[in-house]
Image (tube, grey):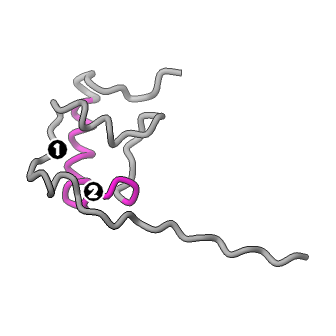
């Protein structure tokens, strides 16, 4: 029975929200910007990974879902 090492806690990124900094809102038609917030498996990334504030994270999720329904972004990855 060896001693287990402590698990390191994930630290959130301490940077400013990109949408607050640019003074813009996430829009469904801006596909290039929305694609930056998707994982390789086309999942929406957490705000702790992206550094987006809570307000814009909610708007970002809605914008990504709207663009998926309009077939601008894929629901899943192409594998």
SS at mark 2? loop
Image spot of residue 6 (x, y percent):
68, 75
From this view, report whether residue 18 is shown above or below residue 13: above
The boundaries of the magenta stretch are 48-67
Q: Secondary structure at mark 1?
A: loop
Q: Is residue 48 above or below residue 41?
A: below
Disc 2 from disc 1: Cα separation: 11 Å
The quarter of the image holding the C terminus is top right
**Residue hosting label 2:** 52
Residue 26 vertical position relative to residue 18 in the rendered view, above or below: above
Give the quadrant of residue 16.
Answer: bottom left
Is 41 positioned to the left or the right of 62 in the image? right
Query: Which residue matches tag 1?
Result: 26
Q: Residues within 10 Å of mark 1 (few under 14, many from 20)?
A: some
In contact (CB < 8 Å): disc 2 and disc 1: no
- Give the residue drawn at x 24%, y 37%: 33
In the image: residue 49, left or right of residue 55: right
Q: Is residue 61 magenta?
A: yes
Please state the horizontal and vertical placement of residue 63, each as a whole percent of the image: 21, 40
In the rendering, at what x and y percent does residue 69 appear? 26, 27
In percent of the image, x 60 and y 70: which residue is there?
8
Residue at screen point 23% across, 58% down: 17
* Residue 78 magenta-highlighted: no
Which numbered disc, 2 or 1, marks the residue that appears first in the sequence?
A: 1
Quadrant of residue 55 within the rendered picture? bottom left
User: Chief secondary structure of the magenta span?
Assistant: helix
Against 77, residue 50 (above or below) is: below
Give how far across and how far down residue 52 sits, in percent: 27, 56
């Amino acid at each position: 029975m060896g001693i287990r090492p402590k698990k390191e806690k994930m630290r959130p990124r301490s940077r400013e929200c990109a949408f607050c900094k640019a003074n813009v809102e996430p829009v469904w038609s801006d596909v290039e910007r929305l694609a930056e917030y998707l994982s390789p498996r086309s999942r929406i990334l957490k705000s702790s990974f992206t550094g987006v504030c809570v307000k814009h994270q909610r708007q970002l999720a809605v914008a990504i879902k709207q663009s998926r329904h309009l077939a601008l972004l894929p629901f899943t990855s192409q594998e």
